[in-house]
Image: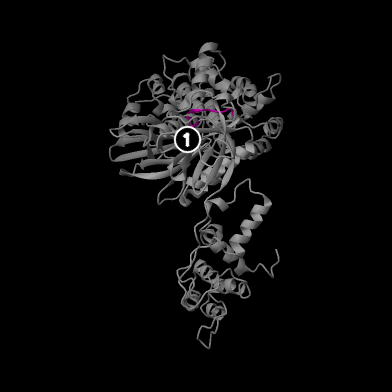
Amino acid sequence: MDKKVWTEELIQVFLVLGNERVNSFWAANIPPSEALMHSSCSEDRRHFITSKYRHGKYRKYHALYGNQKELNNALCINVQCSDLLETLSLIFCGADVNCSTGMPTWPTPHSLAIAHSQLLQAELISHNLNTELPQSEVHKFMEPVHYPPAPCVSHNGFLFKTASMARAVTERKAREEFSRRWCTLNDGTFSYYESDKNANPNGAIKASEIVCLAVDTPEKHGYDFTFELYSGSERLYLFGTDDPETHKQWVKSIAKTFIPVTAEPLLRLDFQRLGRLKCKDGLNLQTSKVGWFALVGSTLHVYLVDSQGEEIRLRKLNELCECETVDNEVLVLVERGRTLYIEGERKLDFTGWCSAIQAAAGRCGDTLSEQQLTETDIPVIVHSCIDYITQSGLTSEGIYRKSGVNSRVAAVCERFRSDARSLRLKEGEHQVDDVSNALKRFFRELEEGLFTSEDASTWLSVAGMESQREKISQYKLLLNKLPRVNKATLQALINHLYCVQRFSELNQMNLHNLAIVFGPTLFQTDGKDYTAGRAVEDLIEHYTLIFEVRLMVHCFEKQSSKNAKVLSFPLQRSIRFHRSVRTVYWRLSFPSRRNCYSQREQRKIRGCQSLSYMTSNPVFQPQITYLKQTSLKN
């Protein structure tokens, strides 16, 4: 970096302004038809940049634009404070950086800024002393001129169309059901004609009437690429083509005609569904808001009126359901700290939105990131199986080694795959060995694997190192390289296996036995050697070091209601209590989380005569990993 050009002050100017703040001026009035897309060619980008900066075509016009005297006075006042964005706005709306301040001591805005110790203001002005500014010719009494509205999007070409419908398309439409039509998009109206020779259209849809645009998956119908238009009058129009580029251009152009400027960022997305809906949120259930929604994969992008855009990750929802009110149907999306109610103002497009959102939220893919996830980024299937086995199977002999009934295992896997969030594993209804085998099958069939196909071989090579210190260090490095979901999942699984092997006297699954089972499963190998098993054994054995978890057992000796003595021990295989300890409370604590018990829970522990009670209650599961080798003394 050339220090002569990139001075410390210039770098600070860029940092203070920032790209987002600068664009609030330079890109305040970009019409949808001229916005850059991912597919924009280099010529389009060159033209856009020239229009944006050299011509100032999309800038936000200052309230004083056109009044040279007032612009100059405002500049002289503003350089005495630290508002860089206001100075930039004044300069590029016509203020003269060489104007006279009327002060002999500080004759220019530059000198005035230095006099008031505004070095960043002075730096900004100095770089624009000779800049050719994007300003129109103005006269003394000229009214402020604002950038005129962009012309409507224009596009035309042949498409194949079916007859309009009053219900959703649920069956495949054959090619024979489509008719070739000449279509035009002009002056905010989408029209279709018998041919390009006809002057009168067969039908037309105004942009203001379009409430939803849905992009179908390829080859859903007779033509490879199709899209659906929904109107406010409850009509559905299906169009198709065999050319992907033609399809893309039509979708892009139609979207630009009915999406408002406030929701313009949605146009840059590769959406499957785009449109207008009414909704309410948990903070205000009295009045409905108009929102613009775009469904992209498993993410719902939302722009509500007078609010910033937001993203809802559908696979991380706590709950998703449909319900009916007196007025209409409602789709309820419950996420952490918030509930969104999407209202069915129109039945036809609302039905499509419900189906699409529920499919995106419920459908599980082949990789970890494509699963339904908990708030901690652990796949719901992994969390549910671990939770069930912790409650019902920690002491089950041969857990994870015994095979379940194949038909029941397959059924559990299919239920999780279709909608993991809806499946509740229950004792008596589901068998421990079926659930444990479903979990193993999930990891065995996982695309890319838990350790990723790119780094799995590196994990196995680390297992062959002789130095334990070096081995643990390398495991930590590899752990931090894993994608977020993979890392969270691995830690949850190893934590669970760490607990399972603590019960090896009862379940016969010690460290080595677990490694034999999970080595080939997690690394997706044939199991002919113990390399994969060695890696899993290392992760379980050195769990607290590799994952940097500090486990402590806290023993509360309660002598009276006003006086309690706390004894803390590192988690180890045996602790002898002093005979004066009459009531013992247990807690497995982590540095990042408090895990205190209420008085009611403490009474349950105090009254516990055997481990079976505590095993059946998930609240007390952390204590089980230690209490199996200790006893409560009165």
Q: Nearer the viewer, residue 538 or 561?
A: 538
Instruction: Give coordinates of residue 452: x percent, y percent.
Output: 64, 32
Q: Nearer the viewer, residue 76 or 539?
A: 76
Q: Is residue 46 above or below residue 344?
A: below
Q: Tell me where residue 584 sits by quadrant.
A: top left
Q: Is residue 323 above or below residue 73?
A: above
| Mark 1 crowd level (few <14, some 14–19, many ≥20, 10 Å Cα) | many
User: Which residue is rendered at x = 56% and y = 27% of the image?
Assistant: 220
What segment carries the magenta color?
360-366
Instruction: Give coordinates of residue 224: x percent, y percent.
Output: 61, 30
**Quadrant (top left/top right/bottom left/bottom right) for the N terminus:** bottom right
Q: Tell me where residue 487 sits by quadrant.
A: top right
Residue position marked by numbered label 1 in the rendering: 314
Q: Label 1 amino acid? A: Leu
Does 113 sit left or right of 337 as displayed?
right
Q: Quick check: can you spot residue 493?
A: yes
